[in-house]
């Protein structure tokens, strides 16, 4: 549904799109033979402004695809809501570090021949009602298969569904199978489709799994597609579950971290689900001063993240100097945007993510007196926040207001700056220029999280609840710090991650997590930062050596190529 390549191409909302963009950049770096399909939203997602009281203002994004994308001539028809809709495509050619190329097709319905209503199908990302959303997903899944064929991309070995949004593609493949062999859509046709499909699920959060009612399905999809859905018995409970559809028709499925794989296996017990842990694209997220450092010490790091393992030989003072440059760059931009001049000496906490309930970005502000006391007793700290709330998410919008209220109360004792319009550029500045990356979601809802990985490769350690990737990335006091009852845990072996699986519903009450956060910050992190500089810089270097080297889309793309895309014969069943 979204791919984030750069801010000028605003067809993304957050982590899911950033992951897809980073991943595709790495497949281009690695010369993997891949083409990608997503949608081209005429008004993007939205541009965020935050009022003085914290109220979020959502503005349409003004942009035009002509400057960045190339219109391809091909148009494919799709039967939608009783009308024929023409689907067009824009092409973006992603170039890797050594000449590899991955084309991305951005589909849209904004064509003159279409009915005015149909031109708006690809208007905005994640907005509108169920029918609108299903129309978009039909354009992506059904239109995507047709467009690839039309453009001459035949004989594709594997269709990788990145979340359920594109799962209708399985039904296009099924129809093609039935049509070409003139057989009924029975088990053998289904098996043939499964051999070509791979599915990745990205979140345990309910809202991430689209379900469409029978009425919506009947109103939007063509009879030939509805027949397939009926034959497969996919409308149990009178709902079409897109994740179930994708999983049923895939030969391989995975979650996006070890724990999330286990959580997803509980959610979908009928198919085996493995895990491939997410990563980030190193050269996208390395700050200029990090790039200079790596170029000097780690030749070849751009297309081989294992090189970062040798960062252990980088002198601490050079690492500290590179980080100082990134921090100064961040604080200059903060001053430019907000007019507030923060200290280059004070411990700077970065706290940026989507403003949504499970992310619990407010945890560190749950006891402001305590926070003030910690800053007074253990050393000055300042906090930088950013994040968009989904336009329909009242809870998320309340969070932004809470941040503004906290800022007012904390005043100059703990300076807090709330930055508008969290995007790739701002994420790059924050993840490299902060001294500590904070993450406090309610487990086990964070499937992976990737911003902490962007921080790690820049030598910025995380302090985080043990959830998602941090279960694999945290070595206490070595790569960063854990918050919570498992705080002394070392990187857990995958077998133990399965054994300590939490309930699928987030535990209520975060008072204990807040307590653990305050204690770790005041008693461990701030003393290390102010009284043991070499100790803190060593943790920074370990973040690069142990986590930057592993949590990359370079490593991740190799895992998908070897474990997911490799054609395997299915066991007889
Ligand atoms: C990396 C990134 C995200 C995802 O970060 P999480 O750690 O998963 O919250 C979201 N938005 C932007 C703009 C990003 O760059």
Image (cartoon, rainbow, N blue to C red):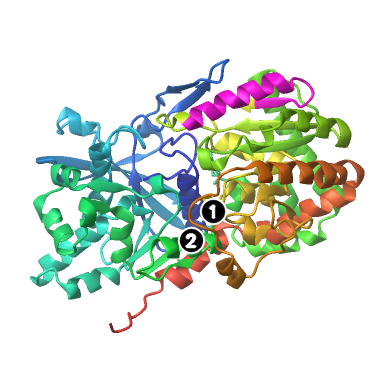
Residue 295 place in picture, x, y as percent: 71, 53
Q: CA distance from mark 1 to mark 2?
A: 8 Å
Element at badge 1? loop
Whether residue 63 is visible here, answered yes or no, is yes
Q: Disc 1 vs disc 2: Cβ atoms closer than 8 Å? A: yes
Find ligand 1 in the image and state its quadrant.
top right
Q: Is mark 2 within 8 Å of ligand 1?
A: no
Residue 226 place in picture, x, y as percent: 14, 54
Residue 229 place in picture, x, y as percent: 17, 58
Chief SS of the magenta region = helix
Residue at x-position 82% and y-position 34% = 374
Residue closer to the observer: 307 or 348: 348
Give the labeled residue for mark 1: 444
Residue 465 place in picture, x, y as percent: 65, 50
* Magenta stretch, residue numbers: 395-417
Question: Residue 538 lies in what quarter of the image?
Answer: bottom right
Q: Is residue 484 left or right of residue 173?
A: right
Q: Which part of the image, by quadrant, shows the N terminus?
A: top left
Q: Residues within 10 Å of mark 1 (few under 14, many from 20)?
A: many
Q: Residues within 10 Å of mark 2 (few under 14, many from 20)?
A: many
Q: Is residue 300 left or right of residue 570?
A: right
Give the labeled residue for mark 2: 263
Magenta stretch holds residue 412: yes
């Amino acid at each position: 549904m979204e791919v984030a390549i750069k801010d000028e191409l605003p067809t993304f909302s957050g982590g899911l799109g950033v992951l897809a963009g980073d991943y595709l950049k790495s497949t281009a770096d690695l010369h993997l033979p891949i083409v990608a399909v997503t949608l081209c939203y005429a008004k993007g997602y939205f541009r965020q402004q935050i009022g003085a009281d914290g109220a979020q203002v959502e503005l349409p994004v003004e942009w035009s695809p002509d400057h960045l994308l190339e219109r391809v001539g091909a148009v494919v028809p799709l039967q939608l809501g009783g009308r024929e809709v023409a689907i067009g495509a824009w092409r973006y050619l992603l170039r890797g570090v050594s000449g590899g190329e991955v084309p991305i097709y951005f589909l849209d319905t904004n064509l003159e021949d279409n009915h005015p209503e149909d031109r708006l199908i690809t208007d905005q990302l994640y907005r509108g009602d169920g029918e609108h959303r299903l129309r978009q997903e039909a354009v992506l899944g059904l239109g995507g298969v047709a467009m690839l064929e039309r453009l001459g991309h035949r004989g594709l070995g594997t269709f990788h569904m990145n979340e359920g949004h594109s799962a209708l593609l399985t039904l296009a493949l099924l129809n093609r199978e039935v049509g070409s062999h003139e057989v009924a859509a029975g088990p053998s046709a289904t098996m043939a489709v499964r051999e070509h499909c791979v599915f990745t699920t990205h979140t345990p959060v309910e809202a991430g799994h689209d379900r469409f009612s029978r009425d919506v399905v009947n109103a939007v999809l063509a009879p030939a597609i509805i027949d397939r859905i009926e034959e497969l018995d996919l409308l149990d409970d009178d709902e079409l579950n897109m994740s179930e559809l994708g999983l049923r028709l895939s030969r391989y499925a995975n979650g996006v971290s070890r724990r999330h794989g286990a959580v997803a296996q509980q959610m979908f017990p009928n198919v085996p689900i493995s895990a491939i842990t997410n990563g980030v694209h190193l050269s996208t997220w390395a700050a200029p001063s990090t790039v200079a450092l790596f170029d000097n010490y780690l030749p070849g790091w751009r297309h081989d993240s294992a090189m970062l393992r040798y960062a252990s030989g980088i002198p601490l003072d050079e690492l500290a100097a590179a980080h100082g440059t990134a921090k100064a760059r961040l604080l200059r931009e903060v001053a430019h945007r907000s007019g507030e001049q923060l200290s280059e000496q004070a411990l700077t906490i970065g706290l940026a993510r989507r403003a949504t309930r499970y992310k619990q970005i407010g945890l560190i502000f749950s006891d402001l007196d305590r926070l003030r006391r910690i800053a007074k007793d253990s050393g000055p700290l300042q906090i930088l926040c950013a994040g968009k709330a989904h336009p329909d998410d009242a809870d998320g919008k309340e969070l932004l207001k809470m941040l503004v209220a906290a800022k007012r109360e904390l005043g100059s004792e703990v300076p807090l700056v709330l930055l508008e319009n969290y995007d790739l550029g701002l994420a790059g500045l924050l993840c490299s220029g902060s001294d500590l990356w904070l993450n406090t979601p309610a487990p086990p809802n964070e499937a992976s999280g990737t911003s902490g990985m962007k921080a790690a490769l820049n030598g910025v350690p995380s302090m985080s609840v043990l959830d998602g990737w941090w279960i694999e990335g945290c070595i206490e006091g070595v790569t960063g710090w854990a918050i919570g009852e498992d705080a002394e845990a070392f990187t857990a072996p995958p077998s133990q991650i399965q054994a300590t699986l939490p309930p699928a519903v987030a535990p209520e009450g975060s008072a204990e997590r807040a307590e653990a956060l305050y204690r770790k910050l005041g008693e461990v992190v701030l003393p290390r930062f102010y009284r043991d500089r070499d100790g803190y810089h060593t943790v920074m270097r370990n973040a690069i050596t142990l986590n930057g080297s592993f949590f990359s889309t370079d490593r991740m793309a190799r895992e998908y190529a070897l474990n997911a895309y490799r054609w395997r014969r299915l066991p007889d069943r």
